[in-house]
Image (cartoon, helix red, strand yellow):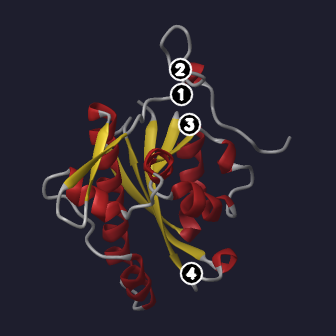
Amino acid sequence: MKEVVLDIETIGDIKKFDELKITVVSIYEYETDKYTSFEEHELGDLWPVLEKAERTIGYNSEHFDMPILNKYYTGDLMAFPHLDLLKVIKEINGKRYKLDDVAKATLENVSKSADGLEAMKWWEEGRKEDVKRYCEQDVKVTKEVYEYGKQNKMLYIQTLTGDLQPIGVNFDLPKEIVGSNGEVGGGNINLTLPL
């Protein structure tokens, strides 16, 4: 599998979305079984990974991570195959849930380690390694939620009464990405750069 799970951390006023700047992008590559973090000035090293990915996977990534990341890319990352777990959940259930709430209800002993506001504070304090660890933990949580949902076709959320409510999901690759021979993508590289 050449799927890549990603998450970003930003700095700036969340109410001024267009002005947010990336501090860290963390990824997990299934092909290498490796976590890597990139600071803003290292994004040039990230692009080849995303260009070769069968698809990228994130949580609330279609409306947050990818548009912000796309501002730094010469082509169009939004045209690459992508799976936003929250988008699937919302399409099925009609509601948006925090990643941490889904993870706690679905998985055993898996949760986020902090929140984005803390990560901003750490960055301002020069605690870059703490931000990278936090972002990589978010990627790990997203990865585990994705894998559980893909295998079980189900995720869970805890209701106000403490019961677990199931949410049916389908995280399989779309048919247009999987060829008739069962191979994914035919070895293509995602390129949207102008010629």
Find disc 4 in the rendering and name its residue: 14
Residue in the foreground of this view, choosing between 75 and 97: 97
CA–CA distance between discs 4 and 2? 37 Å
| Mark 2 to mark 1 CA distance (whole Å) | 7 Å
Indicate the quadrant containing the N terminus: top left, top right, bottom left or bottom right: top left
Q: Which element carries disc 3, helix, strand or loop? A: helix
Residue 73 in which image quadrant: bottom right
Which residue is the site of mark 2? 178
Instruction: Assess disc 3: are there few (<14), some (14-19) or many (≥20) residues with their C-alpha within 10 Å of its C-alpha.
Output: some
* Distance Cα–Cα, label 4 vs label 3: 31 Å
Q: Quadrant of the C terminus?
A: top right
Instruction: Give the labeled residue for mark 3.
Output: 52
Foreground mark, 2 or 3?
2
Q: Indicate which label's residue lies in the foreground, 2 or 1.
A: 1
Query: What secondary structure is marked by label 2?
Result: loop
Q: Mark 4 against mark 3, which lies toward the viewer?
A: 4
- Mark 2 or mark 3: whose residue is earlier in sequence: 3
Q: Is residue 53 left or right of residue 1?
A: right
The 10 Å Cα crowd at callout 2, few under 14, some 14 to 19, many 20 or more, is some
Give the amino acid at mark 2.
Val
**Mark 4 vs 2, N-terminal side:** 4
Identity of the residue drawn at 70% across and 38% down: 191
Residue 81 visible in the displayed image: yes
Does residue 19 lie above or below 99 as drawn? below
